[in-house]
Image (tube, rainbow, N blue to C red):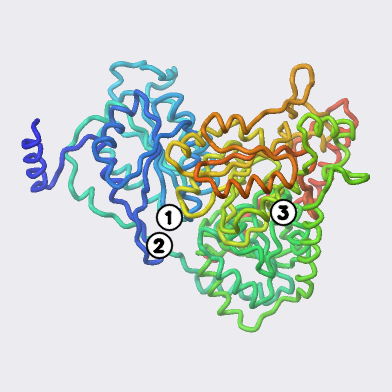
Amino acid sequence: MTATELNAQVAADAKKETIRLTTAQALVRFLNQQYIDVDGQVTSFVEGLFAIFGHGNVLGLGEALQEDPGHLKVYQGHNEQGMASTAIAYSRQLYRHKIFAVTASAGPGSANFVTAAGNAYVNSIPILFLPADTFATRQPDPVLQQIEVDYSADTTTNDVLKPVSKYWDRIERPEQLMSALLKAFEVLTNPATAGPVTIALPQDVEGQAYDYPLSFFKKRVHVVKRVQPSSAELAGAVELIQASQTPVLIVGGGAKFSDAGAAIETFSERFNIPIVETPTGKSAISSEFPNNMGGTGILGTAAANAVITKADLIIGAGTRYTDFTTASKTAIHPGKTQLININLNRMQSYKFDAFPIVADVRDTLSQLTESLSDYRSQFTDLATIKEAWQKERQRLAHTNYDAPAYVPEVKNQFDAKTMAAYAEKLQTHLTQTEAVIAVNNTIDPTSIIVAAAGSLPGDVQRIWDPVVPNTYHMEYGYSMMGYEVPAALGIKLAQPDQESYALVGDGSFMMLHSELVTALQYHKKINILVFDNSGFASINNLQMAQGSNSYLTEFRTADNDIMKTDFAKIAEGYGAKAYRANDRKSLIAAIEDAKKQTVSTLIDIKVLPKTMTQGYGQSWWRVGVSEISNNPKVQKAYQDIQTGIDKAFKYPQFSSQVQR
C-alpha cells in the first residue's frame, strides 16, 4: 500500500464507527487514552512500557510499539524481574498515580515476572504485565519454550502468574481485549484493589486484526474517590479515643499513599498523640516532627517501642500489621489494648479485633481532628523518650572497631579471631551503623533512598532519619532481594530532579543488578551503595541467634577462605563511575564526588559483619526452630520460641464491633 493509499484508508476509517487494528495496536492505542483524576488533578496514567523482546512479542506488540507508541515511553530492559521492579518502584514513589507496563516473551521470560508480581501484590502496587503466550490456535504446538502438561492443553507458563495477580486474563480472540482491559484498569486505578494485572497475549492473536469500535479508544478518566468514614465509624472512633489516656498512631503504607502527612501531623500535635512508623509508612512525615518516634516493631527504635508498650489504644492508619510491625503478635494484644483500624481494605480493617473504619486515611484523620475538640493524651514524656533514642543513635554513629574492649552490636556470635579475619580480608574496620549514619548525614536531604532485604532494612528503619517526606522507599512487604538497584531506576524516572540511592547488601546486589545497565543506557543517573560484609549477614545472624552454627550464609571458598569481591570493578566494567570506601573519611569523600557526576555511580563499601543494629524493646520474632536437634543451643532456642508463643496473641481475629 502506497503512502497515498494509506492516507486515504486512514481518512476513510475516521468516518467510520470502527477502526481495523491488530490486537497489539489496539492495546497500545488504549493505553495511550487512560487518565487518572486524583483530587481534581488529571494526568495520564500509563507512562510507558519496559520490554524485553523475544519471538513471542517482538513481531506483535513490538511491531505495534515501533509503528506508533503514542506518548508511551518505551525502554529496553535487561532482566524481566528487574524491569518489573523498576516499574513497581516508579508507581510506588508516585503514590500509585502512574504506572509502567512490562512485556516479555513466552516461557522463561514471562516466568521471570512472578517474583516481581508477588512484590506488587503484597504491596498493592499497580503494574500491568503483558506476557507473550503460546498460539491460541495451537496449530504449531509445542512451540519453542512451551511447557506441556498432561491435564490441560490450555495451561502455559503464564498460569503461574494467576496467584500473584489481582486480575488475570488471556486474550484468545482480538475482541476479548476490550472487556479484559476495561476490567484491568478498574483494578489498577482502584486504591482498594490496586495491584498487579496480567493480560497474557498469545503470539498469533497479537497480530490478528479486528474492527474495533472507535468509542473503545476515547479518553477515559479514572476518578480516585476518597472514601469517607460513616457517621457511625466517626462516632465510635471518637468515643474510643476520648476514653483512652495513651493512644498511639501507627503510620502504615496506606497513610503514605493517601498523602496523609499533613493530616497526621495536625492530629498528632493537637492531641499530643505519638506516632510510630511501619517500613512502608516511614517518611510519610518528617523525622524532625517532634511526636515522630520512628520505626516500630522488630526493626523499631527504642522510642517507638516504648510508646507502643504504654499504649492503651492503637490507631492503625493504613497498616497490614505484619509480624515485623507487631513483633509476631507480642507487642500488640487486643485483650490489653484497644485498636482502631483505618483502611480502604475491609479485610485489613478487621485485624486484631479492632474497631474498623473502611475509609481514606487522610480524610478520616481530618474529620476526627474536627470531632475530638479539646481531647489531650496523658503522655508527658515524649520529648524525653525521643531524646534518649537520639543519644543512642549518636552512639551507633561512632561505633569503633579499634576502640578498647570493642564488642560488636550482634553479640556472642563471632569471636575476636573471626572478626579480625574479616577485618584483614576485607581491609576495613568500618562498622555498618557508622557507615549508614554517615551516608544519612552526607547525602542531600531531598535525595531518595531505597532498601529491601538483608540487614539494611533494620538499620535504616531504626537509624535513618528522613527529613523530607517521601524520601524513604522501603520494600519490606515482600522483602525481595534484588529489588534495590532496579528500584533506584524507577525512583529516578518518577522524580528525575532528585538523587536516587540504592542501599544494598552484597548478597542482594549479586542476585540482581542488571538494570544498572538500563540506567546507563538511557542516561538516568542512579547511585548504588553496596555494603559488603561477604555474606548473607542477616540470615547468618538469625541462624546463629537460634543456636545453629554458621552454615552456608558466609561467602567463603571451598577451603574456607573469606571471599572479597571487587564490586567497584564490576560497575566500572558496565561504564559507571565507581569508588571504594573502607572508612568514614573515604566514604564521605566518595559520596561528595558522586554528587558531582552525571553518570550512574557505585560505592563499594567494605563493612564488618555483626556491626548492624539489633533489637530494642519488644522485638521478638517467631521463626521455625527445629523441635528435635542434637545441638543444645538449638534445643534452648526451641524452648525460648515456645515461651514467646505462649505470650503472643493467638489469631488475626475479625472484629465483633463491625458497623453494618
Quarter of the image for residue 370 reads bottom right
In what element is the residue under mark 1? loop
Q: Position of residue 626 (x, y in %)?
A: 79, 31
Q: Amino acid at mark 1?
A: His
Residue located at (52% from left, 36% from top) = 516
Q: Which residue is mark 2?
A: 38
Distance (Cα) linking label 2 and label 3: 33 Å
Q: Earlier in the sequence, mark 1 or mark 2?
A: 2
In what element is the residue under mark 3? helix
Q: Amino acid at mark 3?
A: Arg
- Left or right: 397, with 126 as reference point: right
Q: Which mark is residue 97?
A: 1
- Left or right: 293, with 46 as reference point: right
Q: Does residue 192 appear in the picture of this structure?
A: no
Q: Which residue is mark 3?
A: 462
Q: How many marks?
A: 3
Q: Residues within 10 Å of mark 1 (few under 14, many from 20)?
A: many
Q: Amino acid at mark 2?
A: Val
Contact? badges 1 and 2 (CB < 8 Å): yes
Q: Earlier in the sequence, mark 2 or mark 3?
A: 2
